[in-house]
Image (cartoon, grey):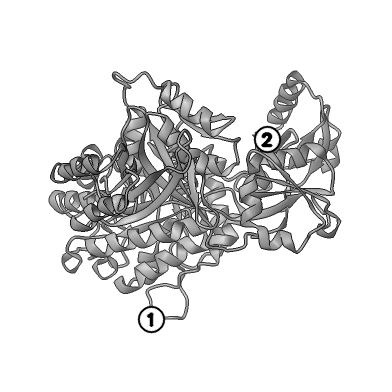
Amino acid sequence: MILVLEKGVTQQQVERLKDLLRSEGHMVKEIGGVEEQVLGIVGKMYRESSYYGALPGVERAVPISKPYKLVSRELHPAASIIKVGDVTIGGDRLVVIAGPCGVEDRKTTMDIARVVRKHGAVLFRGGAFKPRTSPYAFQGLGEEGLKILSEVRQETGLGIVTEMTSPSQADLMMKYVDVVQVGARNMQNFELLKSVGRIGKPVLLKRGLSATIEEWLMSAEYILSEGNDQVILCERGIRTFERYTRNTLDLTAVPVIKKLTHLPIIVDPSHATGIREKVSPMARASIAAGADGLIIEVHTQPEKALSDGPQSLYPEQFEQLMRDLYAIAPVVGKQVDFAYLDKATIMTRPRGESKAPATVVYSGVPGSFSHKACMQFFGNEVPLRNSSSFREVFTLVDSEQAAFGVVPVENSLTGSIHENYDLLLEYDLKIVGELTLRIKHNLLGHPNAPIDGLEKIYSHPQAFQQCREYLEKNPGWDLVACKDTATAVLRVKDGADPKEAAIAGEGADQVAGMAILKEGIETNPRNFTRFVVISRNESLPGPQNKSSLIYSVSDKPGALFETLGIFSRYDINIVKIESRPIHSRPWEYMFYVDLETDITEESRKHILAELTEKTEFFKFLGSYNKGARANP
C-alpha cells in the first residue's frame, strides 16, 4: 500500500502515523524521488484501503498491484544504487565483474585477478563453494578458497563476489566476502534467501534455470523483507528446448526488469551461452539492452580450468571485449572507466600539500549534461559542486576550492565551445582527463500537453543548434535561451504553462517530474560532446596517451608549417588543430592542438624544446588518458 500524505503534514504527525502502522505489524518505508510526501507500507493487509486513506495526515491510499512490494517501482520509483566498497552498481558507469568459475589455487587465481583488474574489471568473481550437477565434479576449495579471494582483494583492491550455498556458511561470508551470490539453483531456496537477507551484505541474485520474471522478483522480495535492500539481479539465461547453447539468454528481461523494479540488473553471458565465442557478442548486446553491468568468466588457461573452461574468455579476449564496451557504452548513456578503482583511491586519500577538497565542480544544475559528465567520470560518491558559469568553474579550481573541474570543450555537431578554450589559455590549470558523452535531446513538457499547442521552448543555445532540423519544422515556436538545459526544464516546471516546453537530455524529466513529449529530436544521433577534467595540482591514474597545447607563430610564410613538420617527423598524430583570435592583437591567432602522445615522456621532451624554438608563445595544457584503453 502507498500512502500519499496531505500537504503541510508535520513531521510529528508523520512519526505518529509510522508508529501506528508499525504497531499493526507493517514495515514502513519513506519513498524518495517523488514530489509528494509518500509512505510505503508492506505486510499483511487486514483492513480495506479506505481505512488507511482515512488515517490522520493521509490524503489517499493506493494499493500496490504487484505481488512483490519492496522490489516494485510503485513503492520505490527511483532506481537503486548498490554500493560495494568504492564501486556503485546501477549508476552511470558500467560495472564488470570478472574471474574464474571456481577458485582452483592461489597462483592461478592471483594471475587472473591481475589480468581482469588491468583491463577494467572492478569486482572479482570466483567460487569457493561450487554446487555442481555431478557429485564427482570439482566442488570448490571451501574456506581455503575464501582465504585466497581475501588475498586477491588485499593485493588488487577488487571487491569479492562468491556464491553462498547454505545458511551454515553465513559466518564465512561475513568474514571474507563483499557480495554474496545466490546461484540459479538456489533462487527459490527460501531459507537461504532469508539468511542472506539477514547478513546485510550486497546480494547478487541469479535467475533460476526455469524461473519466470515474477518468481525471480518474488525471490528478491524474500531478501528485502529481511531488511536487506542491497540486491543486484543477474540474468544468466534460462533453460529452453534450444541445445546450440548451454542456456537461452533472455535479453528481454533487462528492459522488463528496468520497468518493474528499482533494483539494478547485470547479465552473465558466460553461463547464458556456455560457449566462449558467444560470450562477447552477448555481452555487447546486454549493454545495448540497458544492463548495468556484466559478470564474465575469465581464465588464463581455460583448457586446464577445473570448471566451465569452455565458456571462459582468454585474457586477450576479455581485453578486446572491454574496449568494445568502451565504444558501446556512451550510446546508452553509460561509461566504461578503466581507472575506476584508482580514481576512488585518489579522491579518498589524504590531500597532502594540496589545499583543494576532494570536490568536483561543474557549470549548471543537477540534471544538466555537465552534471551527468561528472557522474560518469567520477561516480556517485564523489562530492559535486555546481556553479553558475564556466568561468566560475575555472576560478574555484584555480583558488583550490575544488580539486577538479569538468567543462565541455567541443561538440561533434556544433564544434568547439570557444569560451572554454579561451579560459584554458587564461588560467594556469592543466587538463588531466577527458570524457565523451552522447547528447540525446528530448522535448519535455507538462504531462498530456499536446505538441501542436506549444508556443515557447526553453533550452541552451547549443541545444537549439543541435536540434535545428526539428525546430525548423515548427517555425512558430518562440525559442528562449537558458544557461543550461536543466535550468530550462525547471523554468517550464515552475511556469506551469502547458504551452511551454524545454529541450533537455535523458534523466532531466525524472529530476523535475516532467513528461517526455518527443524523444530523440537532435538532428544527428551521432551527437557527442567532449568534456575535459581540469585541475591545478592533482593528477589522475592511467596512461597519458594524449596531450594538448596552445601556441602562436610568427607572421611569416611557412611558420605554422614548420611546427606541423615537427609532429610529422616524429610520427605524432594530430587529432585536432583549431585557431582562435588573440584578443589583444587583431588578426593574429593562437593554435590549439591535440596530439595522440604523451609529449612529457622523457624520450619526447626534445620535441617540446623544438616547438618552443619555432613558436612565439607556447603553453602546455596537459597530458592525460584519452580513455580508450586500460593501464598497460
Q: Is the N terminus in the top left, top right, bottom left or bottom right quadrant?
A: top right
Q: Is mark 2 on a helix, strand or loop?
A: loop
Residue 41: which disc? none
In front of the other: label 2 or label 1? 1
| Residue 425 in picture, x, y percent from top left | 41, 35
* Amino acid of disc 2: His
Residue at 19 percent across and 57 percent down: it is 569
Residue 219, x across and y down, in percent:
53, 53
> CA gap, disc 2 to disc 1?
48 Å
Residue picked out by circle 2: 26
Q: Residues within 10 Å of mark 2 (few under 14, many from 20)?
A: some
Label 1, residues with CA under 10 Å away: few <14, some 14-19, many ≥20: few
Is residue 126 in sight in this rendering?
no
The residue tagged 1 is 244
Q: Can you say whether 20 is above or below 374 in the image?
A: above
x, y percentage for residue 32? 65, 36
| Lower sequence index among marks 2 and 1 | 2
